[in-house]
Every structure is written in structure tokens, then in C-alpha cells.
Amino acid sequence: MSDKPTIHVPDMCRMHQRLLVHQVHYRPIDPWRALIVMAQVALFQAATADPYFHERTGGDLQRIGEIGCLACFKPDAFGEIVEAAKNKDDRGAIKRLGESWVKP
């Protein structure tokens, strides 16, 4: 067993999951779960790059669960993710967006 800390990223609330899937026009047969996971990763990057996150958690990533839904915490970032996701031919857009928030 590893003694490295585990970080449990909170789930996106149902409202934001629905907004994401519907605003990107995913159908039930589309990979909507993958879309939610990609959005979660980008939201994690946006949240952890925010000085207010560090103020609220004391900089301890293990306390990220105290923030709750990261889309609720970072609504502007969520909106940018939705816009990036609308181009279904470029799934890398969400990844690049998330990386842009953590790059110095």
C-alpha cells in the first residue's frame, strides 16, 4: 500500500452534468461519460490554479472535496469548457484549455 495521499475529486453536480451534455448536444449513444470526465479534469486544473482555492483549503489538495462541484466553484471555467467541447472533432480542445490554466 502506498503512503502517498489520495485526492478524491468531487463529482460534478447533476445540474452541471446535464448542462454540459445538453449544451454540447450529445445524444445517449455519444460518449457523454467521457465528456464529463474530460470536463472534470479541466475543472480540477482550473480550481487548483485559483488562489481562492488555496485560501479555502490551505493549499491541501486532499481537501478538494470541501469545495463541492467544481463547475459551481468555477462557473466561468465551466462555460469555457462547454464552448471548447462543442467542437466534437477536437477533443484535445478541453485538454489544452485545462493545461492553459495551470501553465505559468
Image: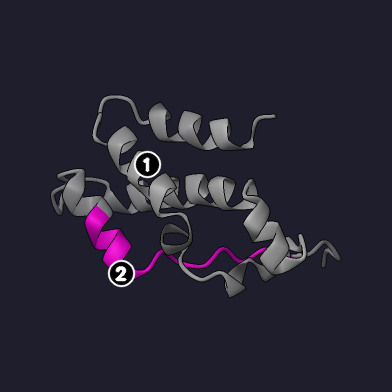
- Residue 27: which disc? none
Q: Is residue 97 left or right of residue 66?
A: left
Q: Is residue 11 left or right of residue 102?
A: left
Asked which secondary structure carries label 2, the reply is helix
Relative to residue 83, is residue 29 depicted above or below?
A: below
Q: Classify residue 58 by image quadrant.
A: bottom right
Q: Position of residue 11 (x, y in %)?
A: 45, 66
Q: Quadrant of the N terminus?
A: bottom right
The image quarter in which residue 9 lies:
bottom right
Q: Which residues are magenta?
A: 6-19
Q: What residue sits right under mark 1 in the picture? A: 81
Residue 18 against residue 27 in the figure, above or below: below
**Quadrant housing residue 66:** bottom right
Q: Residue at x 27, y 52 (%)?
A: 20
On the image, the x and y values in percent for residue 53 come to 64, 59
Q: Considering the numbered disc 1 on the image, is that residue within a helix, a strand or a loop?
A: helix
Across and down, in percent, residue 7 comes to 67, 63
Within 10 Å of disc 1 (Cα), the crowding (few <14, some 14-19, many 20+) is many
Q: Nearer the viewer, residue 38 or 80?
A: 80
Tell me: residue 63, above or below residue 50.
below
In the image, farthest residue toward the top = 89
Tell me if mark 2 has few (under 14), some (14-19) or many (20+) residues whose alpha carbon lies within 10 angstroms of its own.
few
Q: Is the residue under label 1 in contact with that under label 2 (CB below 8 Å)?
A: no
Viewer-closest of 47 and 93: 47
Q: Amino acid at mark 2?
A: Arg
On screen, residue 59 versus residue 64, left or right, reads: right
Tell me the residue that label 2 is attached to. Answer: 14
